[in-house]
Amino acid sequence: MSDDSTLGDLASATVVVTAGRPPATPNQPLNVPVVLTSTYTASDFAPQPGDLGYGRWGNPTWTALEDTVGALEGGPALAFGSGMAAISAVFALVPLGGTVVIPDTPYSGTSQLARELEAAGRIRVRPVPQADTEAVLAALDGADLIVLESPSNPMMDVADLPTILAAARQGGVLSAVDNTFATPLLQQPLSLGAHLVVHAATKYLSGHSDVLLGIVVTEPDPENDLYGRLLGHRTINGAIPGPMEAWLALRGMRTLAVRIERASANAAELARRLGDHPAVSQVRYPGLSSHPGHQRALAQMRGFGAMLSFELVGQSAEQAERVCANVRLWTHTTSLGGVESTLERRRRHGGESVLVPESLIRLSVGIEDVDDLWNDLQQALEAAVL
């Protein structure tokens, strides 16, 4: 693998293209190949440093992906079989009966996992509105772990990461930030004080709606007990990625910078147009000056991303469902972060927080022509609401 320590002075848009490649020597492939194996030939004598040993312990294709994400986030990375496998590994760091602070409107999978662990007596859950910094700071008292999403899914709340993460460190609270929406190109939580960064690599990192993967990145601690504990959890629990999935994700990442640039520009324009539409009561996008977290986002992000949510006048769930059913170019589906634009009413899922408005529609804006996207969204709104 290439020496990614030499990439520190390069822009993220360059790192995402150049990291995790084989050495640039004659007759080497430009890209790391897919290593499809369950077993490796053993050393002649006792196991040697760097021995892979068995397919559940390591794979060169995973390593290439991990090196790339780690170079972008600023710490060693571990790939998991899904985003939920990654967040499950983070929850596993909490001692039995420990307290976990989570947003009161997080990704529904995170909330459901936390509640299941609480029901089993494994942890205690302390939900808090993450945009309310004073409430979050108060919730840290006696906690073992805080998990933040910024911007959050689907409410687009922006947490004051530097303040909260500094307080967590001072209080001895482990901190993890789900950076799926922002990606490491727009935000690097480790540099803001986080111990851990989590990605549903299924989404923007892979970018083509064809992979299930998760990533956890740990702070660059020389002793790095967190990395070792997470690696042990992945190995013994079998929460490993497939080599083909890792290869696809790495291939998708090579265009991450151009995808994020185009999709973010589209999202900003759609947010502006939605704000002027008579059927829309509220647009949730950190790039709008009207967003409560706009100044925070300006301070801690390099851009505002391609995710946004909006609500309808009248707050009708039925009208929101009709909007989703009437689109022709947009795809009505639950995932996000691909090159194609998708949307859905989040409360259609039973696990979604009751604090999420019934008519809230989440948009994952893709890289299509923005006028085509707007025309389709506009006709769906007019057919369903006006």
Image: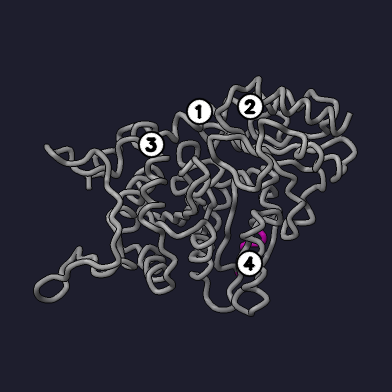
Q: In this figure, which residue is indicated by the disc labeled 3?
A: 254
Nearer to us of marks 3 and 1 is: 3
Name the residue at the top extreme.
371
* Residue 77, position as x, y percentages in the image: 38, 54
Mark 2 vs 1, N-terminal side: 1
- In space, the residues marked 2 and 3 are separated at their CA atoms by 23 Å
Camera-side residue of 2 and 43:
43
User: Mark 2 belongs to which amino acid?
Assistant: Ala
User: Mark 4 belongs to which amino acid?
Assistant: Ala
Q: In this figure, which residue is indicated by the disc labeled 1?
A: 261
Give the residue drawn at x 65%, y 20%: 371
Asked which secondary structure carries label 2, the reply is helix
Q: Quadrant of residue 6?
A: top left
Give the residue drawn at x 50%, y 58%: 82
Asked which secondary structure carries label 3, the reply is loop
Q: In this figure, which residue is indicated by the disc labeled 4?
A: 114
Mark 3 vs 1, N-terminal side: 3
Mark 3 vs 4, N-terminal side: 4
Q: Which residues are magenta?
A: 138-142
- In space, the residues marked 4 and 2 are separated at their CA atoms by 33 Å
Camera-side residue of 302 and 114:
114
Question: Is residue 35 found left or right of 386 in the rendered image?
Answer: left
User: Mark 3 belongs to which amino acid?
Assistant: Arg
Q: Is residue 172 magenta?
A: no
Mark 4 vs 2, N-terminal side: 4
- In space, the residues marked 3 and 4 are separated at their CA atoms by 33 Å
